[in-house]
C-alpha cells in the first residue's frame, strides 16, 4: 500500500488518483470479509470518507444503502447543460469544483450534410451556444463546440480513464465502461452537486455478472452481445444494477467495441456497465496519446481494475454468453429489447407486416460510429464495388462520432469511398438518433409507414423523426451497410446475396476488424479551454430571451409558510417526472424556468375531477371556483401570496431524474408535496430545491383529503424539525370540520439545512460566505 500511495498520489493530473483510490479501498477492506466485485471496487474507492462517514463495507446493502461519492469528472451536453449551468451560477461559486465538460452535440439538426447543418445550428441556437461558451469560460469548464463530436465519443477519446468515475447528464454515460471507467447517467441537479463540491449520492447498485466465453466471428459484433442481453433482461431488467463483464471473452475485443456494449446497457435500464482492464484498453489509450494513463493503469490493473478472485460468487445474478455461438441481431421495431437473431428476422417482418423496403440506413450515434465501425463499412463498399455494385439501394446517412474520427476517416479514404456509394456524411453529432432530423423523404406529419435500419441504441416510437409510423431497427454498422446494399429488411447477409439491376449477385463476406487507425488525425480545433481565472468574465444572456433566464435564488424558509396551505391538486395514480414536467414542445424552454413552469403537471390526473383526457392537468381555483390548468392556478396563488401544497399518490416523481419537476413547484410558490410515497431521486431533488416532501404515515389518509381542504403542518419550524421525527398534518375542511394525521420525512440533518436556506445551492453559498 505504501508503494502505491507514494507512487500514485500524484496521478491526479491524469484525471484520477490511483494512490488515493487504492488507499481508500485498503481502508474499507478492513471492514469487509469477502472479495469485492469490480463495480464495488470502483464505487467504494470513490466513497467520501471522513469522521461523519465511517463506511463499513459489510453493512453496505445493494439496492438500499445510499453511497456518498466524489466523481472524478462531470459531463453535460447542450440540451441538459443550460439548466445545470444556470443552477450552478445561482450557487455563487467562482469555479466548478470537479473537472467538467460541456458538449455541443444534440441541437444540430441533420438535413443536408455536415457543413450546411452546422451553419444552420449556429444560426438557430446562437444564444444557447453563446451562453454555454461564456458560462464555461467563466466557471472553468471545457466547452467542446458544435462539430466536436458526440459527448460520449469525445469523453472516450479524451477523458475516459480505467478505474475512474464519471457522471454525465445523459443516459449513455456508461459508454466509458469500454475503457474500464464507471460512467453513470444523472439529472442536472446531481451534476450540479458534483460541480459544487457536494457529495454525490447513489443507492449502492446490484451487480449482474455477465460471463463471456469464446470469440466473436463472422458477422457477429459486440452490438450483438448487448442486443442479445436486451432480449434476456428486457428494457427494465438491469434497473438499479451495474452490468459487470468477466471471463476470457473480455480479452478478445477492442476498447471502442466494448464501449458499444456499455453504451447500450442503458437500454436495459442499468445504472452502468463495466469491463475489467484489457490489453486493448492500453492500445486505445496509447493511440489517443495517453501513454502516461496507459502506463499507470497497467500497474494497477490487478489491484483496482479487475474483480477480486472469488467475487463472482457475490454477483446478484450471473448470465453466460458464448460469443462463438452468438448470431448477429437486428432489434426492433419500437423497443430495443425486441431481439431478432438475423436468421429469424425475415419471418418476423412478414408475419407482422413491417415495411419490407428500407427507407433509410444510418450509421452513427455514440453507440457505433468509431473508426473501427466506419472502416468495416468501407470494406463492404469496396467488396460490393469490385462485383459491380457501385451504389447503395437505400439512402445512407453517416454521423462520425467525433471530429477526430471524421478527420481520420477522411484521411484514410473511408469517407471518400462511402460517399462514392451514395452516403451523405452528416456532422459529428447526435442528429437522427435524438430526433434532430429534418426528414423530407417520407411524409412525417402524415405518419407515413416506413422502415429504418441504424446502428443506434434506441428505437422508441418517433425517436428519430417524430413519426410514430417509422419502424426503427437497430443493429451493427456492418449489418446496416449490408442491408443498405440489399434495400430490404427481410435480408440475411449470412445466407442471402445482394442482387444488382443487371441481375448480378454477390454474397458479401463479413469485414475484418481493424481496431485502430495507423494514427488518429486531430481535425479542426473545436476545443475551448477556460482561462485560469474567469472571475472577470460575464455570462451572455439576453434579458429578452424566451429560452434562457438566470435563476433567482429561492427565498429561505419563511416561518409560517406551511400554515393554512391550499391543496393545488390531488394527483391520482401514476405521476412520473414526465407528468410533472412534460417534454416535447417544452424542450426548447429547458433553460427558462419561468416559461417551462407553464407545463407543470399538465398531463397529471386530478383525483377531484373526472379522469378524462380533457381534465388532465386541470384543477379548480380555490378562490374563483373556475377550472384552469394547474400552473395557471399556482401562479395566481403565488401572486396572492397564498401558500399551497400538492397531494401525491404512490411513487410520486418516478421516471427520469429531470430537475425541472422539482424546480417548477418551488418556483410557482409551493411549500410541500405530501404523497403516499416518492421515487427516491425526485424526493431528493425536491429537498435540494427547498420543497418539503412528506409521506402519509397511514397511506389511507390520502383518501381523506377533500377539495378545498386547507392544510397546516406542525413540527416543521426551526428547532422542531428533526431527523426521524414525524410531522403533524392538521386538515381543515370547507365546512369547518378538522382532523389530524402524522406525516413522515426522510431528511437527515444536512438536508434540513437545505430546507432552512431555501435550497441546497443557497446552503452552499451561505457556507462559503
Ligand atoms: Fe446522442 Fe443518441 Fe448518443 S442522442 S448522446 S447519439 S444516444
Image (cartoon, rainbow, N blue to C red):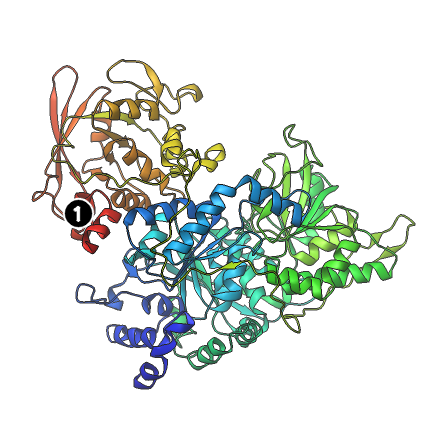
Can the viewer see residue 677 in this picture?
Answer: yes
Label 1 secondary element: helix
Q: Residue at x 33, y 70 (%)?
A: 45
> Measured from the top left, where is residue 167 in percent x and y?
40, 57
- Find residue 94 and report its horizontal and vertical position in percent: 31, 55
Nearest the viewer among 650 and 603 is: 603
Q: Is 135 or 428 nearer to us in this picture? A: 135
Q: Nearer the viewer, residue 721 or 340?
A: 721
Q: In the rendered image of this protein, does residue 173 appear above or below residue 355?
A: below
Image check: 280 left or right of 424?
left
Kindly indicate the quadrant of the structure image that contains residue 251. Answer: bottom right
| Ligand 1 contact, mark 1 (Cβ < 8 Å) | no
Residue at 33% from the left image edge and 66% from the top image edge: 46
Q: Residue at x 32, y 39 (%)?
A: 663
In the displayed orientation, state which residue is furthest to the front.
536
Q: Horizontal placement of 62 versus 513: left or right? A: left
Instruction: Locate residue 567: give its quadrant.
Output: top left
Q: Is residue 45 above or below residue 671?
A: below
**Above or below 667: residue 504:** below
* Disc 1: which residue: 752
Q: Where residue 507 appears, x then y in whole percent?
A: 81, 59
Residue 117 versus residue 215 in the image, above or below: above
Give the x, y percent position of residue 243: 45, 61
Amino acid at each position: 500500500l505504501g508503494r502505491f500511495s507514494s507512487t500514485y498520489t500524484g496521478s491526479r493530473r491524469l484525471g484520477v488518483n490511483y494512490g488515493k483510490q487504492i488507499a481508500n479501498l485498503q481502508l474499507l477492506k478492513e471492514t469487509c470479509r469477502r472479495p469485492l466485485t469490480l463495480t464495488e471496487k470502483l464505487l467504494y474507492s470513490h466513497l467520501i470518507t471522513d469522521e461523519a462517514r465511517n463506511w463499513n463495507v459489510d453493512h453496505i446493502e445493494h439496492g438500499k444503502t445510499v453511497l456518498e461519492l466524489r466523481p472524478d469528472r462531470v459531463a453535460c451536453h447542450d440540451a441538459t447543460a443550460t439548466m445545470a449551468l444556470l443552477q450552478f451560477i445561482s450557487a455563487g461559486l467562482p469555479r466548478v469544483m470537479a473537472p467538467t465538460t460541456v458538449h455541443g452535440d444534440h441541437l444540430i439538426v441533420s438535413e443536408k450534410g455536415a457543413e450546411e447543418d452546422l451553419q444552420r445550428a449556429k444560426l438557430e441556437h446562437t444564444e444557447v451556444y453563446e451562453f454555454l461558451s461564456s458560462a464555461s469560460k467563466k466557471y472553468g469548464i471545457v466547452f467542446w463546440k458544435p462539430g466536436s463530436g458526440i459527448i460520449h465519443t469525445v469523453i472516450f477519446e479524451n477523458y475516459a480513464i480505467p478505474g475512474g468515475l464519471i457522471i454525465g447528464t445523459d443516459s449513455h454515460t456508461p459508454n466509458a465502461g469500454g475503457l474500464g471507467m464507471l460512467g453513470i447517467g444523472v439529472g442536472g441537479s446531481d451534476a450540479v452537486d458534483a460541480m459544487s463540491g457536494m457529495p454525490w449520492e447513489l443507492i449502492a447498485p446490484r451487480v449482474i455478472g455477465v460471463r463471456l466465453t469464446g470469440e466473436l466471428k463472422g458477422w457477429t459484433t459486440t452490438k450483438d452481445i448487448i442486443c442479445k442481453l436486451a432480449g434476456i433482461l428486457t428494457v427494465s431488467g438491469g434497473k438499479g444494477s451495474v452490468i459487470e463483464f468477466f471471463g476470457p471473452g473480455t480479452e478478445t475485443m477492442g476498447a471502442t467495441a466494448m464501449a458499444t456494449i456499455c453504451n447500450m446497457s442503458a437500454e436495459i435500464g442499468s445504472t452502468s456497465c463495466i469491463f475489467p482492464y484489457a490489453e486493448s484498453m492500453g492500445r486505445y489509450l496509447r493511440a489517443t496519446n495517453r501513454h502516461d494513463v496507459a502506463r499507470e493503469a497497467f500497474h494497477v490493473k490487478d489491484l483496482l481494475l479487475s474483480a477480486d478472485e472469488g467475487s463472482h460468487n457475490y454477483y446478484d445474478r450471473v448470465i453466460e454468453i458464448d460469443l462463438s455461438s452468438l448470431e448477429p441481431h437486428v432489434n426492433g421495431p419500437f423497443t430495443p429489447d425486441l431481439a431478432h437473431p438475423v436468421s429469424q428476422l425475415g419471418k418476423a417482418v412478414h408475419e407482422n407486416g413491417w415495411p419490407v423496403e428500407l427507407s433509410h440506413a444510418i450509421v452513427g450515434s455514440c453507440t457505433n460510429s468509431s473508426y473501427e465501425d466506419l472502416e468495416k463499412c468501407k470494406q463492404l463498399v469496396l467488396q460490393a464495388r469490385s462485383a459491380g455494385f457501385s451504389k447503395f439501394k437505400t439512402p445512407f446517412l453517416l454521423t462520425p462520432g467525433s471530429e477526430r474520427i471524421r478527420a481520420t476517416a477522411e484521411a484514410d479514404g473511408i469517407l471518400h469511398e462511402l460517399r462514392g456509394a451514395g452516403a451523405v456524411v452528416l456532422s459529428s453529432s447526435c442528429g437522427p438518433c435524438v430526433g434532430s432530423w429534418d426528414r423530407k423523404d417520407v411524409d412525417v406529419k402524415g405518419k407515413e409507414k416506413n422502415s429504418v435500419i441504424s446502428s443506434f441504441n434506441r428505437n422508441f416510437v418517433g425517436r428519430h423523426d417524430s413519426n410514430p409510423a417509422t419502424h426503427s431497427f437497430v443493429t451493427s454498422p456492418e449489418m446496416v451497410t449490408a442491408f443498405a446494399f440489399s434495400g430490404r429488411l427481410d435480408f440475411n447477409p449470412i445466407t442471402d446475396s445482394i442482387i444488382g439491376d443487371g441481375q448480378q449477385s454477390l454474397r458479401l463476406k463479413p469485414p475484418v476488424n481493424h481496431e485502430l487507425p495507423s494514427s488518429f488525425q486531430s481535425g479542426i480545433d473545436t476545443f475551448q479551454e477556460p482561462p485560469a481565472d474567469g472571475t472577470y468574465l460575464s455570462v451572455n444572456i439576453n434579458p429578452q430571451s424566451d429560452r434562457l433566464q438566470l435563476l433567482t435564488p429561492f427565498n429561505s424558509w419563511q416561518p409560517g409558510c406551511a400554515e393554512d396551505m391550499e391543496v393545488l391538486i390531488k394527483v391520482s395514480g401514476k405521476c412520473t417526472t414526465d407528468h410533472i414536467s412534460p417534454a416535447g414542445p417544452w424542450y426548447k424552454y429547458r433553460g427558462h424556468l419561468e416559461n417551462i413552469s407553464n407545463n407543470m403537471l399538465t398531463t397529471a390526473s386530478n383525483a377531484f375531477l373526472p379522469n378524462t383526457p380533457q381534465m388532465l392537468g386541470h384543477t379548480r381555483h380555490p378562490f374563483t371556483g373556475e377550472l384552469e390548468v394547474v400552473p395557471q392556478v399556482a401562479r395566481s396563488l403565488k401572486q396572492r401570496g397564498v401558500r399551497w401544497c400538492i397531494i401525491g399518490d404512490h411513487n410520486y416523481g418516478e421516471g427520469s431524474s429531470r430537475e425541472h419537476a422539482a424546480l417548477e413547484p418551488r418556483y410557482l410558490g409551493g411549500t410541500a408535496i405530501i404523497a403516499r410515497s416518492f421515487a427516491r431521486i425526485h424526493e431528493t431533488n425536491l429537498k435540494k430545491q427547498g420543497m418539503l416532501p412528506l409521506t402519509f404515515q397511514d397511506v389511507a389518509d390520502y383518501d381523506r383529503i377533500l377539495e378545498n381542504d386547507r392544510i397546516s403542518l406542525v413540527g416543521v419550524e426551526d428547532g422542531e424539525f428533526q431527523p426521524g421525527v414525524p410531522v403533524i398534518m392538521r386538515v381543515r375542511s370547507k365546512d369547518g370540520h378538522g382532523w389530524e394525521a402524522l406525516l413522515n420525512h426522510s431528511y437527515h440533518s444536512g438536508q434540513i439545512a437545505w430546507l432552512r436556506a431555501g435550497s441546497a445551492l443557497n446552503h452552499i453559498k451561505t457556507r462559503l460566505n
